[in-house]
Image (cartoon, rainbow, N blue to C red):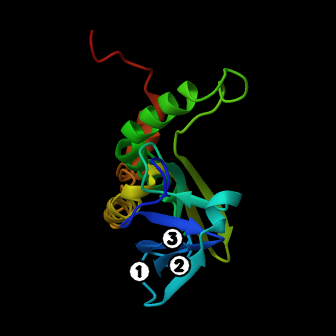
Amino acid sequence: MGKNGIRIGDWVEINGVGGEVTEIGLLSTTLLETGSLADKGHPTGRRITFMNNFAIRGQYFNFSTAGQWMWDEISVPVPASDDTQATVDRIGKAVLEETKENARIAEQEWKRGTRGDGLSQFSAAPDVNLRPSGSDFNLQVRYVTRASERFALRNRIFQRVIELLHVPATPAPPDPPALPESAQATEAALPFRNPNI
């Protein structure tokens, strides 16, 4: 369906239905449905055929072409504790490490594709937000990824998050041992003495 159109094997979304192109005919195109973008990309087993007029009306999106970036999001429950903020900070650093190259390339491509009016302030840096959820928290992580690498990157980020959630909290340093009452009284009565003299 054209040089920059759809080919067999492409992952596309046509009229809100996502899937892999299995046949392209003169009048129709057939997909093996994998669900919408929010789904995990597993085939549903349904073959769906569309009349090719969707291409004329521009009601499709091809995720297989080069430079196809998308925002993805994961959500993870985080138990409330004294170490919650430190855990969120560690997760934010891990997500930044996993996505920094994609974010850099996406920003470059987006800036080349604009006329300089609108996306100059745009950032593809990941966004990590903590939201209250009952007695715990929900961690929402948004990041940019190539559509073709979405599931591999999502799995790597989930793996890093799970590892960081199982890092034990850093224990607070123990309090110094208390002096006996007689030592406290003696220490309070003595003038300050510099130990370096």
Look at the numbered disc 3 and give the secondary structure of its residue.
loop
Q: Which residue is mark 3?
A: 26
Please state the total of marks drawn on the protein image: 3
Q: Residues within 10 Å of mark 3 (few under 14, many from 20)?
A: few
Q: CA distance from mark 3 to mark 2?
A: 25 Å
Q: Nearer the viewer, residue 161 or 190?
A: 161
Residue at horizontal 41 percent and vertical 37 percent from the top:
186
- Relative side of 24 to 50, left or right: left
Q: Horizontally, is 55 left or right of 77 in the view?
A: right
Q: Residues within 10 Å of mark 1 (few under 14, many from 20)?
A: few
- Of all residues, the one furthest to the front in this rendering is 26
Q: Nearer the viewer, mark 3 or mark 1?
A: 3
Give the amino acid type for the residue marked by disc 2 in the picture. Gly
Q: Is residue 164 above or below residue 175?
A: below
Identified at 45% across, 75% down, the residue is 40
Measured Cα–Cα span from mark 1 to mark 2 = 8 Å
Number of the front mark, 3 or 2 = 3
Query: How much space separates mark 3 and mark 1, taking CA atoms?
Result: 28 Å
Q: Is residue 132 above or below residue 174?
A: below
Of residue 85 and residue 11, the one placed in the foreground of this image is 11
Where on the picture, by quarter, is residue 60?
Answer: bottom right
| Residue 33 in sight here | no
- Across and down, in percent, residue 28 comes to 54, 75
Label 3 or label 2, whichever comes before in sequence order: 3
Pointer 1 with pointer 2, Cβ within 8 A: yes
- Which residue was labeled with disc 1? 42
Percent from the top left, x then y, of residue 81? 52, 66
Q: Amino acid at mark 3?
A: Leu
Q: Which residue is mark 2?
A: 35
Marked residue nearer the N-terminal end (3 or 1): 3
Q: Does residue 181 lie above or below 101 as drawn?
A: below
Q: Quadrant of residue 45?
A: bottom left
